[in-house]
Image (cartoon, helix red, strand yellow):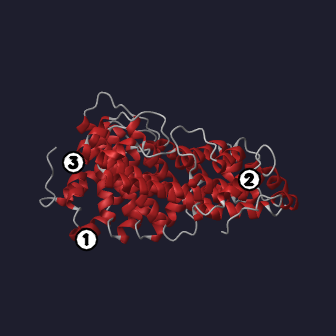
């Protein structure tokens, strides 16, 4: 497409868009290719921060309202055909650039209803099973427009919080780019360059998505994330539990592989950080893991990640130093999920539900006793011992529960005492000691713990 010369006739570009917005009653009359070309010329001219005066003038014109009108017409209730889709991409660029560091224009677009349109666009693209390159560009640019519209601007941030934008954006990000999933997709029929380009768009969308969430959440006491987002957030952990062989052709492309691994780890870190914060700050979230219809699936995903998620073999293709850096990053994420589990287990109102949840206590005991059905793992994993002890300590704060842990079939006391040896990690000792203190609150347990188990105990 030949790019229009804005410098020669800038007003004409605005006129094309404004005039097109007057035809929304009959969608077929809108000249989408002309709108695309005009918007492209405007967007390109507005990329520079030096164009502040020009942005102010355009913001005071009919352009913001016309853009919002056309966006709403193009994406009413479904993904449109190619012409309005391409025009939408360029108009979103115009909106994003007009809002860049410009609070007056941000308010103009807020008043015109841009944020509602962006939320609608995000919702439509979240449902796409196989988005095209053009779909990905529109979705990414919608997120970028939202970022520019709210960054540091309190009225927009408040509106987006009330509208559930953080959850919508996170759900879109995880739908477009589930971290770690790319490795198991054979991607037949696509060459490496084409695949790489598509994933670059996805990666960019993920980056902007988490920046939007951070911008909206800034200053909020509790992250404004609804329970409807908890499922996608937690289930995104599952791609790091090896179930299928890595088969993507991008694994053998060095640049693509490195970019995707970075994106995986960054997306995982963001998800875990948010999950940890929600588990710590929100009673509603903690109870969701115990009592919601999705509780078993949510809790199972967390437990599977802690126990089974591992370093992918292809992480070692870029040298020893890079492998260790990636593994350290991953270990920090796993530690965050363990903290989330412990917070969930610490919810007083959820204790009975968690204790009676099928298999949870047995699984935690297996972590503590290292009775794990995992081939190739070491006999004892300190992270599981610590997580198991602290989780059991939190969900056994009733005498009946703590007594059960020291009786058959669990009979934990001998195993716990074995950990209190000089060669054990200090964090393991602290977690074991904490669990023993909790168990000793029941008077009948004190008798059991006094039957000689402590005779050979080393000082902690």
In the displayed structure image, the side of residue 303 where residue 85 appears, left or right: left
In the displayed structure image, the side of residue 245 where residue 91 appears, left or right: left
Quarter of the image for the C terminus: give it. bottom right
Q: In the picture shown, does residue 396 fall above or below 102?
A: above
Examine the image and state in which quarter residue 73 appears: top left
Q: In the picture shown, does residue 131 fall above or below 397?
A: above
Quarter of the image for the N terminus: give it. top left
Is residue 116 among the parts visible in the rendering? Answer: no
| Label 3 Cα neighbours within 10 Å, binned few <14 / some 14-19 / many ≥20 | many
Spatial separation of the CA atoms under disc 3 and disc 2: 76 Å
In the displayed structure image, the side of residue 361 where residue 116 appears, left or right: left
Spatial separation of the CA atoms under disc 3 and disc 1: 22 Å
Q: Which residue is mark 2?
A: 414
Examine the image and state in which quarter residue 282 appears: bottom right
Q: Which residue is mark 1?
A: 52
Task: Identify the residue shown where x is 32% and y is 52%.
Answer: 320
Task: Identify the residue shown where x is 53% and y is 57%.
Answer: 335
Secondary structure of the residue carrying numbered label 2: helix
Mark in front: 3 vs 2? 2
Task: Identify the residue shown where x is 70% and y is 49%.
Answer: 290
* Mark 1 vs 2: CB contact within 8 A: no
Q: Which residue is mark 3?
A: 37
First along the sequence among labels 1 and 2: 1
| Label 1 Cα neighbours within 10 Å, binned few <14 / some 14-19 / many ≥20 | some
Tell me residue 70's x, y (percent). Answer: 36, 49
Spatial separation of the CA atoms under disc 1 and disc 2: 72 Å
Tell me residue 119's x, y (percent). Answer: 46, 52
Secondary structure of the residue carrying numbered label 3: helix
Is residue 271 among the parts visible in the rendering? Answer: yes
First along the sequence among labels 3 and 1: 3
């Amino acid at each position: 497409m030949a790019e229009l010369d804005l410098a020669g006739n800038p007003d004409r570009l605005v006129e094309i868009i404004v005039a097109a917005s007057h035809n929304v009653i009959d969608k077929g009359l809108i000249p989408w290719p002309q709108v695309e070309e005009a918007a492209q010329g405007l967007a390109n001219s507005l990329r520079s921060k030096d164009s502040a005066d020009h942005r102010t003038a355009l913001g005071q014109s009919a352009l913001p309202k016309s853009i919002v009108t056309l966006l709403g017409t193009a994406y009413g209730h479904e993904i449109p055909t190619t012409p309005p889709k391409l025009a939408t991409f360029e108009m979103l660029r115009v909106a994003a650039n007009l809002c860049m560091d410009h609070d007056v224009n941000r308010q103009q677009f807020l008043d015109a209803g841009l944020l509602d349109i962006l939320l609608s666009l995000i919702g439509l693209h979240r449902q796409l099973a196989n988005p095209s390159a053009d779909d990905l560009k529109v979705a990414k640019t919608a997120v970028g427009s939202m970022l520019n519209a709210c960054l540091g601007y309190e009225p927009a941030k408040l509106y987006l919080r009330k509208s559930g934008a953080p959850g919508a954006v996170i759900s879109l990000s995880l739908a477009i780019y589930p971290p770690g999933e790319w490795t198991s997709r054979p991607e037949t029929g696509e060459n490496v360059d084409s695949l790489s380009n598509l994933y670059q768009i996805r990666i960019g969308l993920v980056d902007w998505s988490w920046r939007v969430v951070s911008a909206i959440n800034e200053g909020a006491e509790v992250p404004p994330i609804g329970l409807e987002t908890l499922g996608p957030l937690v289930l995104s952990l599952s791609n790091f539990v090896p179930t299928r062989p890595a088969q993507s052709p991008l694994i053998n492309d060095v640049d693509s592989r490195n970019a995707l691994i970075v994106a995986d780890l960054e997306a995982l870190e963001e998800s875990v950080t948010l999950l940890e914060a929600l588990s710590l700050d929100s009673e509603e979230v903690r109870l969701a893991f115990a009592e919601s219809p999705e509780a078993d699936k949510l809790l199972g995903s967390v437990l599977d990640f802690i126990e089974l998620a591992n370093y992918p073999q292809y992480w070692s293709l870029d040298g020893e130093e890079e492998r260790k850096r990636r593994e350290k990053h991953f270990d920090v994420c796993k530690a965050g999920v363990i903290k989330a589990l412990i917070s969930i287990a610490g919810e007083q109102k959820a204790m009975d539900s968690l204790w009676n949840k099928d298999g949870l206590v047995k699984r935690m005991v297996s972590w503590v006793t290292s009775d794990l059905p995992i081939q190739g793992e070491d006999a004892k994993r300190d992270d599981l011992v610590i997580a198991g002890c602290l989780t059991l300590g939190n969900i056994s704060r009733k005498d009946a529960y703590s007594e059960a842990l020291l009786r058959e079939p669990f009979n934990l006391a001998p195993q716990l005492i074995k950990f209190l040896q000089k060669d054990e990690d200090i964090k393991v000792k602290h977690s074991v000691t904490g669990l023993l203190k909790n168990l000793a609150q029941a008077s009948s347990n004190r008798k059991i713990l006094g039957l000689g188990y402590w005779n050979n105990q080393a000082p902690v």
